[in-house]
Amino acid sequence: MSDWTVPADRPDYEEAVEAALAKLDLETKADLLAGIDMWRTLAAPDAGLRSMTVSDGPIGVRGRFWTAADPSLALPSPTAQAASWDPELVRRTGNLLAAEARRKDVDVLLAPTINLHRSPLGGRHFEAFSEDPYLTGRIAEAYVAGVQERGVGTTMKHYVANDAETDRFTVDNVIGERALRELYLRPFEMVAAAVNPWGVMTAYNTVNGTTMTAHKELMDVLREEFGFDGFNVSDWGAARHTVEGVEAGLDLAMPGPLTVFGKALVDAVREGRTTEAAVDANVRRILKLAARVGALDGVEAAVTGRLEAIEDPDALLREIARRSFVLAKNDVPAGDETRILPLHADVVHSLALIGPAAAEARVLGGGSATVFPPHVVSPLDGLRAKLGDRVVYAQGVDLFEQIEAANRGFTLTARPVAKDGTQLPAEPLANGDVKWMGYVPGGLTADEFDHALVEGRYVATKTGEHVFGTRGFGHHKLVIDGETVFDQDQEFVSDDPFEAFFGPGVERVRIRLDEGQEVELRHEFTPFDFPPGFPPSVLFGLMHTEPRPDEQTLIDEAVAAARGAEIAVVVVSTTALTESEGFDRADLRLPGRQDELVAAVAAANPNTVVVVNTGSPVEMPWAADVAGILLTWFPGQEGGNALAEVLLGAEPGGRLTTTWPKTLADAPVTQVVPDDEGKLHYEEGVFIGYRAWQRRGTVEPAFWFGHGLSYTDWAYESIEVVGSTVKVKVRNKGAVTGREVVQVYLSPDESAEVAGGIERTRLAGFQAVEAGPGEEVEVTIPLEARSRQFWNEQTHSWETVPGTWKVKAGRNVADLPLETLLVEG
Ligand code: BGC
């Protein structure tokens, strides 16, 4: 339905692909279907093919090197992008990502993540857009269009139903046909139809008994029914079968070079277990990708010419962040006449800013979506820039959970050392983490490399007991001020190869230091072999923990600061151990004593605003006791500036893309752990998110899907169905210019019978509008036929739900003041 202009294939691609294919022998073809390392494909110079580079995705472009020495812009997280409900803004986000990709010589971005928010416990919730398939699809179309119109490919991921992390390599998600079609496949269908994505990534998990990288049936749905004509890359380490993989249309097994393809594929052809024709079909798609991104000689890339530069990327990052923030609550504090927000810079005399995340901003979630941003603006930086020393900061609680990569007070470099003893040039480290993934710097091969050497010093930031430690599988030798404090192996004991990337640090020694005291550090690390299938990498860390403060003192100081200020702003957050790829959450509680902190601050100052800096829902037991709640997600590197702008008057444009429960127990889907047979049953069918909340009807969530307040008030004036569109008029009744997301939902006839039940409401369209005080605007929202259909599991086809539909418009799924009828046919 969206009419994005997408780059078309050039007419000579097919011929060029056939000509290149004809020059490749079976061995080269089989190698082409496997990566040569972590991120690159094989070059075949005789066929005019250069190597291509892929990179994560989705909040920034990491590039081949995962190091602070090669920084990447950090955008607001995908949930935040979607919370803008603004496809045009997301398209511009895609443009920015493409510019980053080009700067880093990346041909294909491993994004967007278009799995659904099935349960709030999902560890990668922050990386997906929404609980609603239609909203996910619309945002994803814009994302893909934005990246690809700048000549960089995308991979919709993870196909399909990678909605949780527990046992993600082995879990068998058992999903009914209807839920698959209406929910989980739907965003892939929409993107394939609207914007011709150049890639898809097949997931780790199994669906209904077949692993996704060999799932011929579901790949056929994607290619033959949805019209997808791009390449299919496995998730990293997900390719498991040579013959079934190639025949299911898996075109690139990553990472390489040791995969199920290459030699194993040549053998399979030679032994007659599959055919060279099957291999050719996949190679053609790799060659077509090469043509599209400009990696194949003799044909022009799909997008050529100089691309308009992105002026002032930080300004765009702030705009996306502001538009994503959801003003969930904005009350008039007791004894006051106006709502707590916005604050007015000229009349605020004192503001107590509280919380660890106010000073150490959490701008992104964990896992492969992590990038090293060039700078980070914390809430404290942002507010100080606007209000100067009227801002008083108090940490409030100690969110320490585990030893972290050496950071404040450290000056470190890392260098590779060759087997012959040669020390290669050192690179500066932003923190104690070294992630040489699939390569060794300085051009050393894995065979020539012996160990890595981190050197530097630490100037103690506090007096007390300092903990030093190590992370990474291999041999560590840690020397502090000339004394060897640890000289042993750290073993790899997990089933999950990604432990090598994201595994925790381990404490090795405690040393008492006075503030300002300096120590010399030397950390040698010799890696073990990597888990099979992963290219040699050097991943380790020098870890450190500062002396911990007394928590009750922190809380008391925060309460005193709040009491002494006109306004208290508490920033609460999750931690690296809460929201990440690789594991799910066990609960929705804010870590540490943050709930207690908010309650204490709110008791001390009625003008308390809580800024919730999390990627996904958290319980807020204090919600009724604070005047304002602003949800800021993981807001990217410019988050602190955007926050200051919004607190001081810029319209917070966001609306929830997922329903927020009051407690985990209220959430409709809380099962993300497979049973003893490794199966996770999607028993709820199509009833996830608001669909489930409404069907149950007995429990109110904290905030409904679509919810988000504006700094002005809106009146919903009229609704009319004209042909296949809905026209809605809204008026800005307030005193300031504002932005509203007009949402259109459909409700089926109460007598409509659909096996398994039908939802009470479905999102069918939306459009953001801006209007000045008193101004009326009309939006015209197209309705897709699909919004009135269901998937019939008997006939295996879409069918229109019979009867009269109600068409409703309003500000969230549970607040729809306008209603009219739509008679089918
Ligand atoms: C993740 C993917 C990611 C890939 C490469 C996997 O573990 O699931 O989303 O693109 O790693 O980093």
Image (cartoon, rainbow, N blue to C red):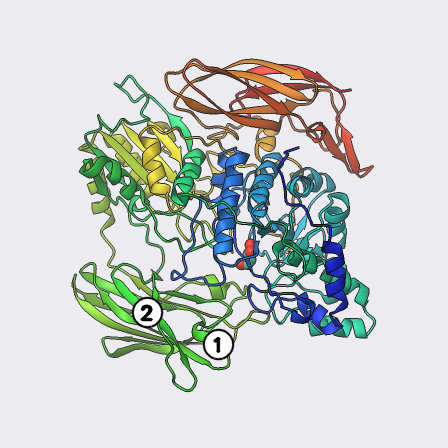
Quadrant containing ligand 1 reads: bottom right
Q: Position of residue 47 (x, y in %)?
A: 69, 68
> In front here: 102 or 379?
102
Left or right placement of residue 813 versus residue 803 in this view: left
Q: Tell me the distance, in whole angstroms, between the alpha carbons under discs 2 and 1.
A: 22 Å
On the rendered image, what quadrant is the C terminus found in?
Answer: top right
- At label 2, the amino acid type is Thr
Residue at image coords 38%, 85%: 421
User: SS of the residue at dot 2?
Assistant: strand
Residue 44 lies left or right of residue 574; in this view the side is: right
Task: Mark 2 or mark 1: name the one nearer the start of the chain.
Answer: 2
- The label shown at residue 528 is 1
Whether residue 387 is situated above or below residue 286 in the rendered picture: above
> Going 71% across and 57% down the picture, which residue do you hit?
285
| Residue beneath disc 2 | 413
Q: Looking at the image, which residue is at 52% across and 55% down?
A: 56
Count neighbours of disc 1 (C-alpha within 10 A) and say few if under 14, some if 14 to 19, many if 20 or more: some
Residue 89 in the image: state x and y as whole percent.
Answer: 50, 36
Q: Are marks 2 and 1 in contact (CB under 8 Å)?
A: no
